Image (cartoon, rainbow, N blue to C red):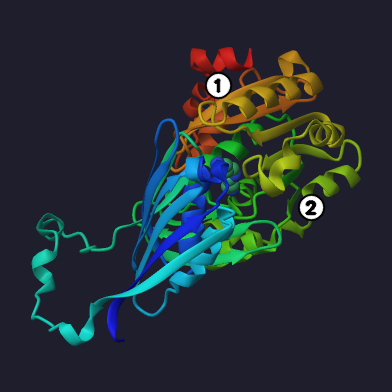
Amino acid sequence: MASLGRHIIVEYYDCSPDALNDVVHIEKSMEGAAEDAGATIINSTFHHFSPYGVSGVVVIQESHLAIHTWPEYGYASVDLFTCGDTVNPWVSYQILKDAFKAGHGSAVELKRGEMALLTRKNFDVKQLRDEKSTEEGDPIRTRDVWFTERDDKIALSLKHDGKLYDVQSDYQRVEVYNTQAYGNMLTLDGMVMTSEKDEYVYHEMITHIPTLTHPNPKRALIIGGGDGGTAREMLRHECLEEVVMVEIDEKVIDACKQHLPSIAAALDNPRLNLIVDDGIKYVKEAAEGSFDIVIVDSTDPVGPAEGLFSVDFYKEVYRILSEDGIMITQSESPRFNNKVFKEIYQVYRSIFGQDKVHCYLAYIPTYPTGMWSFSYSTKGNSHPLENFDKEKSKAFSEAQELSYYNEAIHESAFALPNFVKKMIG
Ligand code: SPD
């Protein structure tokens, strides 16, 4: 290596003014350009100027990518600075040229830190370590890399020690991060699905509420749920004679079996009928009245899960429910996904009836805003509170040594803040 780093100074001309004024597009493109060049992203910050122009930087483990745009001239200046041999900044150059629809571009490469002019110094790395963390006995961590889930207004970040799995499946990008606070964590298309240290909240709440309020549950269907957490909780109920789970993406199962075994263990349980297929198709082909409980453990309503939020799908679920059947769905965050949240409750009510749909909440730190909702819709007369046997629920929660669900949580989960009540009418 003749130099410590490579610095490509880039000019893009005749670009699309719209592209150069779109801060979200620019940030995504810069991050994509960094990743595709082989870099590890640490963090990024981007700013839109009024009335136009964007500045931003993506800090990568191997240095940085920076940009400033002048949409009114169709011009962007970009710095691509990388160290080491594993990142190729020219890959980023081409990706960004396409992303900004540049008519033409030019670039000069400079060597930074010419080795012939450098002398290596003796340097004691221990002096840089965080003394407080050493005193408290925590492992010393000098790495500062973050996973961030964001929409255009809110973001949630978790520090991690690296990625354990990263596969583009036929449906979505499947990743597992080794986070410092929440253990191994599965993300799909950049959205948090589950983490080792808080998964129990979601999985206990999506399963035990219906199973402990249905009068006589025998057959249950899980749509999605490829990590296995929902199946694990359903299988705690001896009364269930049949638990079918239909997951569309084999890579999700694969990732979780490898890296989230405490969640995925149930996927090998002989009591589980695991089918890798399209859940929408499965429901469409299932016989009328064939399940007592249907749980839709979906991702968010983008990508492969979009159809799981459609009127047609819910109508089919209604059809395959037995007389007292219950449908449970994860119904997003009332704050973060407020549009979808409002819409789906209207849809559920139009199918199941005005009084047959209930909403309950749980607190999940790794999901955006922390407040997550579930819907409980009943075809017959099962009511989540009126049919509730407190003693049975208490005994179940104690015997199973559950971490979140208990009889008091069951009741209180249906107490909604006023703003949530207002949203769903
Ligand atoms: N934004 C998070 C929505 C996740 C819903 N499903 C999670 C799968 C856990 N089994």
The disc at residue 278 is 2
Residue ID at (87%, 33%): 319
Corner quadrant of residue 138: bottom left
The C terminus: image quadrant: top right
Nearest-to-viewer mark from 1 and 2: 2
Q: Is residue 105 visible?
A: yes
Mark 2: amino acid: Asp
Does 163 sit above or below residue 77?
A: below
Residue ID at (44%, 59%): 11
- Residue 366: x %, y % from top left: 44, 43
Mark 1: amino acid: Phe
> Which element is circle 2 on?
loop
Residue ID at (23%, 81%): 114
Q: Toward the viewer: 249 or 104?
A: 104
The N terminus: image quadrant: bottom left
- Residue 215: x %, y % from top left: 73, 29
Some atom of ligand 1 lies within 8 Å of the CB belonging to the residue at label 2: no
Q: Toward the viewer: 86 or 80?
A: 80
> Which element is circle 1 on?
loop
- Residue 46: x %, y % from top left: 39, 44
Q: Does 8 sit left or right of 266 as displayed?
A: left
- Residue 374: x %, y % from top left: 60, 31
C-alpha distance separating marks 1 and 2 = 31 Å
Corner quadrant of residue 97: bottom right
The quarter of the image that holds ligand 1 is top right
Q: Which residue carries the number 1 mark?
A: 414
Some atom of ligand 1 lies within 8 Å of the CB belonging to the residue at label 1: no
